[in-house]
Image (spheres, rainbow, N blue to C red):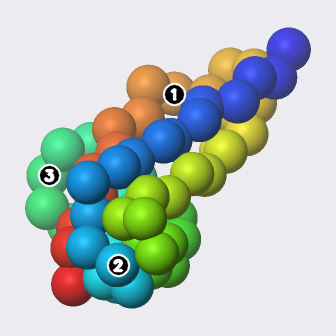
Amino acid sequence: MTGSLVFSVSGGNNSWPFVLLASTNLAPAHWVLVTTNEFDAGGNFNLTNNIGSGSPQTFYKLQLQ
C-alpha cells in the first residue's frame, strides 16, 4: 500500500528560496535533499511526497536559504 504526505506551508516571504530535507536518522550527516523551490507570491508552497509501503519512519525539515 502506498500513500502520500502533503506539505502545505504558509507565512513565507514572496520568492524566498527553501530546501526540503529528509532523513530516517536525525544525525546531521544523514539528511538528503527532497526538493528546492521558492515560496509563491502569497508566501505559500504545497508539495506531495509519495510514500511506499514498508518505508521507514522519515523526518523532514524545511531549511530557508
Pick whichever, 24 or 59, lies toward us: 59
**In the image, is residue 15 above or below residue 51?**
below
Q: Could you tell me the amino acid type at mark 3?
A: Ala
Neighbours of disc 2 within 10 Å: few (<14), some (14-19), many (20+): few
The residue indicated by pointer 3 is 27
The residue indicated by pointer 1 is 56
**In front: label 1 or label 2:** 2
Q: Distance between the residues labelled 3 and 1?
A: 16 Å
Residue that appears at 34% across and 78% down: 14
User: Can you tell which mark lies on residue 24?
Assistant: none
Residue that appears at 50% across and 58% down: 45
Neighbours of disc 1 within 10 Å: few (<14), some (14-19), many (20+): few
Q: Could you tell me the amino acid type at mark 1?
A: Pro
Residue 12 image-quadrant placement: bottom left
| Outermost residue toward the top in this view | 1
Cβ atoms under marks 2 and 3 closer than 8 Å: no
**In front: label 2 or label 3:** 2
Pick whichever, 37 or 57, lies toward us: 37
The residue indicated by pointer 2 is 14
Residue that appears at 43% across and 65% down: 42
On the image, the x and y values in percent for residue 61 come to 27, 52
Q: State the SS at label 1.
A: loop
Residue that appears at 14% across and 52% down: 27
| Outermost residue toward the front in this view | 42
